[in-house]
Each structure stands twice: as C-alpha cells, then as structure tokens.
Image (cartoon, coloured by chain):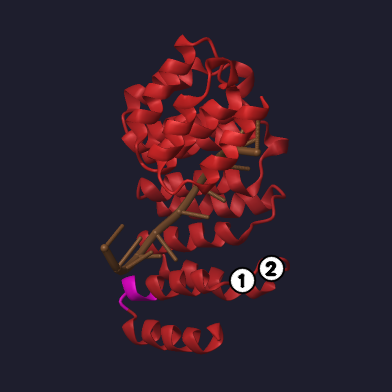
Chain colours: A red, B brown
Amino acid sequence: PQLGTAVLRAYRGCRSVADARKAFEALAEEHRDLVSWNAIISSYTQDGQCSVAIGLFQRMDLEGVKPDKATFIAVLDACADIASLALCEIVHGLLDPELQTDIVVATALVSMYGRCGSIDRARAAFEASAAAERDPVLWNAMVAAYTQQGQGREALKLFREMQQLGTYPDEQSFIGVLSACSHGALAEEGWDIFVSLGAYDGVEVTQDHYSCAVDLLGRAGWLDAAEDLARTTHVEAN
RNA sequence: GUAGUUAUGAG
C-alpha cells in the first residue's frame, strides 16, 4: 500500500499519462490497490482517452479489484465523453442500487446522460437522489442537461425551483443559468438574473459571469450593450 | 493518496 501511494504521488507530477501508466504497470499486482486503479483510470478520462479508461476498468474487474464510487465517477465521465447511450446504460447497470442514490454518483449520472442527449434518463437519475441531500452541484448538472437539450426554459425553471426548495446557488449556478438563457433566447430573464447577482451573499461575482452576460447580450443582438459591458468589465477586472 | 456540475473564447 505504501508503494502504491508513492506511485500516486508520482502520477501527480507526471505531465504525461503515458508516464503514469508506466509507473502503474511497474507496480506488482499486490500493490495495485483500488486507489491506484482509480487514479490511473481517471488520468485517462481527464486526458480524453476514454476508451483506454474503459478498457482499464474491464481489466480491473478481471483482476478481481472491486470498483467503488470513485471508479464509477471516472468511468461514467468516460462514457459521457464517448457519448454512446448503450455504453452508458451498461456501466449504469453495474452500479449497486445503493451507490446510485449517492449524491456524487447521481451528479455524474445526470451529467453523463445529459451529455449523451438523454434528458429523460438524466432526470430519472436526478429524481433517484434523496431530495434532502441535493446540493447546488447536482442541481447545476441538471440545469446543464436541459441547456444541452436546448430546453432553456426548463433550465431556468429548475434554477428557480432549486432556490424555492432551499438550495442556495453557487457561482456555477449562475454560469449555468446565464448560458441557458443565452442559448434559449431568454435574454431578458438572463439579464435580470445577472443584475441580481450582487444580492446573493457569499456568491463571488467573477469575470466568468461577466463573460456570460456579454455572450447573452451579444446573442440577443444587443451588440452595443454587449460591447459596453465588455469594456466596463475590463476596467473592473483590474 | 483517487472521485461529481461549468458557458464563451483560445488551442
């Protein structure tokens, strides 16, 4: 286990996944524990080499290492990238029912199905989570799924519902809802939300929020306003 | 020690 940990430290310093892989393969099998499998699989997912990640996941199973929550999160992410609904469903089917209701796993499922174009399955995964545990990250994933389907109004509705049900939005919630508005021809609604940002204590208004607002105005055809805001932003950013 | 949402732009 100590050796596995040392190799993991090396992974972080590796600029290339290939180097990490060499280190991983050099480990004796008894030192390849769950965490080192998870680390190498997620390195591939993050590097965009998703079919390699899936292949390692299969090999892990062959070697008798039982996947946990972190494994599935990396693999679900790989499935999302490959965008094959069939593959998504296979991996989803391997999840313990107990794990499916985990908030972090549910978020990965929502995101995966959203990115694969299956809004119904995304919604089902959302609904399968315990309502009391829903946090802004999960809500944001669901909002993004609607946006990806071109359902801006639904995305906006969900953003409001999140707050009505007592979940306080975070920075990303605003990025998500502003982009929903911008892609869904909901410029007025989006602008109102942007203007309201300052009233949310604890939410730090960033350059990214301004970029979203500029995008929103630009797509709505309000080019002068977009340009003005972009100029103002540069001043405020310093 | 590994793990969830992220628009625009850039590559």
Mark linked to residue A197: 1
Q: Secondary structure at mark 2?
A: loop
Q: Image point 42% across, 17% down: which residue?
A: A58
Mark linked to residue A118: none
Horizontal side of residue A178 vs A8, given as left or right = left
Kindly tell me whether residue A123 is visible in this rendering: no
Most common secondary structure along the magenta stretch = helix
Query: Which corner quadrant of the image does residue A214 belong to?
Result: bottom left
Q: Image point 67% across, 28% down: which residue?
A: A2
Start and end of the magenta stretch?
Answer: A217-221
Compute the Cα span from label 2 to label 1. Answer: 6 Å
How would you rate the neighbour count of disc 1 (Cα within 10 Å): few for under 14, some for 14-19, many for 20 or more?
some
Q: Chain of mark 1?
A: A
What residue type is disc 2 on? Tyr
Q: Chain of mark 2?
A: A
Residue annotated with mark 2? A200
What residue type is disc 1 on? Leu
